[in-house]
Image (cartoon, rainbow, N blue to C red):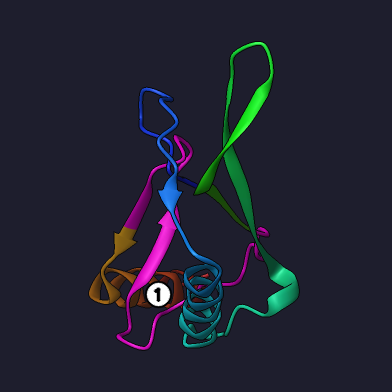
Amino acid sequence: MLIGVEKDFTVRGRKLTRDDIDKFQRHVDEALKQFNPSVKGHEYSINFHPVSFEDGKKIAVSDFYVIEMAISSPDVDDLYFTHYDECWIQKPDDQIEQVPVTELKYLRRKIIENNENK
């Protein structure tokens, strides 16, 4: 996931101070710990890339960054839930979609019924 890049690939960046970067990292860490099972620090990465323009030479734009976040793929059997019992999946087209818990419970019940009928 890239933050600071538009859908048309225009680089905008986000203005961030050192304090903002620290707060962002802490917020992401705390949010991912609330998933069930929690996402550990070694299972994701956050990189801050300084925005620069190229006009004969690269000139860094002060305090503007593109944020790159990556979470390693979980085991196939793992489902992750937020502390609000929300479950999110990444579809083949890279879109992220919330799956209602009621739908997951229905699917689980159907799987159990199918296994019992075998």
Percent x, y of residue 111: 44, 70
Q: Residue 58's quadrant in the figure?
A: top right
| Residue at x-position 62% and y-position 69% | 77
Percent x, y of residue 10: 40, 25
| Residue at x-position 58% and y-position 32% | 52
Asked if 5 appears above or below 76 in the picture, the reply is: above
Choose between 77 and 15: the one closer to the eye: 15
Whether residue 76 is in magenta: the answer is yes
One can see residue 75 in this view: no
Q: Residue 55's quadrant in the figure?
A: top right
Whether residue 111 is in magenta: the answer is no
Percent x, y of residue 81: 43, 79
Percent x, y of residue 78: 59, 72
Choose between 80 and 57: the one closer to the eye: 57
Choose between 101 and 31: the one closer to the eye: 31
Callout 1, which amino acid? Arg
- Asked whether, in this view, residue 100 is left or right of residue 46, the answer is left
Q: Secondary structure at mark 1?
A: helix
- Asked whether, in this view, residue 12 is left or right of residue 103, the answer is right
Q: Which residue is mark 1?
A: 108
Q: Main SS type for the magenta part?
A: loop
Per the rendered image, the range of residues in magenta is 71-97
Asked if 98 appears above or below 12 in the picture, the reply is: below
Of all residues, the one furthest to the right in this rendering is: 42
One can see residue 7 in this view: yes
Mark 1, other Cα within 10 Å: few <14 / some 14–19 / many ≥20: few
Asked if 3 appears above or below 51 in the picture, the reply is: below
| Residue at x-position 39% and y-position 81% | 82
